[in-house]
Amino acid sequence: MENAYTDVSKIFGEDVFNDSAMQARLPKKVYQKLRQVLNEGETLDLETADVIAHEMKEWALEKGATHYTHWFQPLTGMTAEKHDSFVSAPMENGKVLMSLSGKELIKGEPDASSFPSGGLRATFEARGYTIWDATSPAFVRHSEGGAILYIPTAFCSYTGEALDQKTPLLRSMQALDEQAMRIVRLFGNTEAKHVVPYVGAEQEYFIIDRAKYLQRPDLIFTGRTLFGAMPPKGQELDDHYFGTIRPRIAAYMHDVNVELWKLGVPAKTQHNEVAPAQHELAPIYEKMNVAVDHNQVVMQTLKRVATRHGLRCLLHEKPFQGVNGSGKHDNWSLMTDDGMNLLDPGKTPHENLQFQLVLACILKAVDVHADLLRESASDVGNESRLGGNEAPPAIVSVFLGEQLDKIVAQIVNDGTASSTAHGGDLDTGVSNQVTIHKDATDRNRTSPFAFTGNKFEFRMVGSRDSIAGPNTVLNTITAEAFRDACDILEKSGDFEKDVKDLIRKYTLEHSRIIFNGNGYSDSWVHEAKRRGLPNIASMVDAIPALTSEKAVKLFADFGVFSETELVSRSEVKYETYSKDIHIEARTMLDLAGKKLIPAIISYAGMLANTANAIEKCGGDIYVQKKQIAKLSALLHEAEDAREHLEAVVLEAEQHPAGRAQAVCFRDYVVPAMKALRTPIDEAEELVDASYWPLPSYADMMFEV
């Protein structure tokens, strides 16, 4: 296949109504008013909105758009959209005008009763509103259905509660901005007006052949394989990681990148991940709410382009048992609008009191609210990853690295830091090789929350998850720590002394959260318990953190969530867990009862008929009898397990929706599912491949 040359500089952002497009098309006064709205938080008047809407519509029509949609992120974890055409009422001459008013741009009214709301909305209470998020640019997406103008929006109920991921995120960004600016002002910066969180979300995914995907009902209904024996080779040789990208995958990645670049997504890195058929895409950092929207665009683009290539993109955290699953590393930093990264330690971090204070506050935030951070990364798919020697453990800790660890030790022991360790030159033993300077510290892939030079990397997030939830928590807990510090320091009579004392106090009180060792080791589990750190293994046990007294006060203090909104989200999560496991269990029962157990019976029957025929001829049937005995035992075990799973599913269905039902699914249905899988996976290794009704792991992971 021959790819035409792609001039990225020309196509980047061409389908985005970005600042350049607005500046070129909007009247100067309108553009200036919009910038004031974006930069200063002023209200957008309807007259200005009308002008913006008209120019946005004209721009979209030039791109071939026929419809527009308010694009929002409900509590399903995915995005939602309702398309309206630009067609207005027909005129007397039979023609129509194409229009988009300021009111239509700013506000939409989707049905709010059919999305998860955790009781916030009854079925008969249908009205909800989408509200334009002007800080995230509109864009035109081209597909087989034509071109559509996408307008990023927030989504709330008629009574004002957030029904989406975006609204709390924007609230948390506002809270963090306000409190971080107090830190900035304390250290003499009078120029900056805002502190904005930046995020880069690394996206892992699997790619398999679409024809094989369509033969796997478990993948279709649940996103993961519920049955499947491991092939002779998995990821043991580490040969797939960063290996040569196969031509079919390379062509797919090229088309993904082109689509993303046109939509203004700064896709940067692509490579093979650890497991066979697993890959990764990473973007450059962006303002948080834009990065959240762009990550949704990335996931949708990965799926849509895969279909065009006869492939299927799997975003489930654990599509294949026995090999690495997929996560999403959330790289988080804090930038002032005049270009200062609050998480950049500089060349002499031992002298950088502002950085030390920011770091100490973050240590405090993560320690105090470790349960909330753990909850923010909880979903059903992540149950199979966290703590499984392929992802961070379920215990939240902070990795600082050698350089910062030495500074922390100086602060704890001496009250202040007096020196900084540096990396030095790297000696490879090759005389004619270019000398490179080492970083000041190594990396730690087992840490859930790792400092990586000028940012923190939250590594627990699941590959399907919106990054809005984890970042809402990160923003809010950090805002709280900044507020507490500023409440003390703004009253200081001796600022340098008091800030050093506060840095030492926070570091001493919260040093238990720092761990630079192997998070996969059993010894860390015991050590974390000794330190009093929470080890929350299950999503079901993580959810109560949302409605704890501590969490309710935290989010209420900063206007991020009301108690009602928190209760509703906990109910949504319990229901989601139960429904996901319920669907998986029913799919297992259907597959086992209608395909897999009959396939084992058919193969065993063939062996029996063959054995009878051979025995009549006087032949030795030892092997056939042994195979039949093994298959018969596995069939017995599988049928008993199938009947047991059927019974516990019926029992779980009787529980009322909520925590009790989720606990029942976790404690009884999940173990019963594992018990059914075990004998059937063993039988797959004995049954002739021509009898097995599903593509094998080898077929899917190695034949793309």
Image (tube, rainbow, N blue to C red):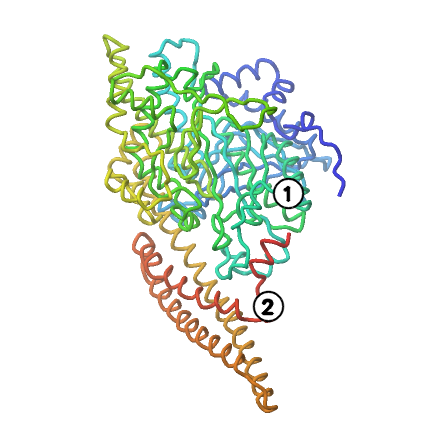
User: How far apart are labels 1 and 2 at the CA level?
Assistant: 29 Å
**Earlier residue among tags 1 and 2:** 1
Q: Is residue 420 above or below residue 323?
A: above
Q: Position of residue 529 (x, y in %)?
A: 25, 42
Q: Position of residue 140 (x, y in %)?
A: 63, 34
Q: Amino acid at mark 2?
A: Ala
Dividing the picture into quadrants, the one containing residue 429 is: top right
Would residue 231 appear left or right of 346 to someone viewing this image? right
Q: Is residue 206 above or below residue 369?
A: below
Q: Which residue is mark 2?
A: 689
Residue at (40, 32) in percent of width and height: 450
Q: Which residue is mark 1?
A: 245
Answer whether residue 88 is visible to the viewer in this image. Answer: no
Would residue 440 appear left or right of 476 to someone viewing this image? right
Q: Position of residue 11 (x, y in %)?
A: 68, 28
Q: Which mark is residue 392?
A: none
Dividing the picture into quadrants, the one containing residue 147 is: top right
Query: Callout 2: few (<14), some (14-19), or many (20+) C-alpha neighbours within 10 Å?
Result: few
Q: Position of residue 633 (x, y in %)?
A: 43, 76
Would residue 449 appear left or right of 24 to someone viewing this image? left
Q: Amino acid at mark 1?
A: Ile
73, 8: nearer the viewer:
8
485, 433: nearer the viewer:
433
Answer whether residue 510 is visible to the viewer in this image. Answer: yes
576, 509: nearer the viewer:
509
Secondary structure under the numbered disc 1 in the rendered image: loop
| Tag 1–tag 2 contact (CB < 8 Å) | no
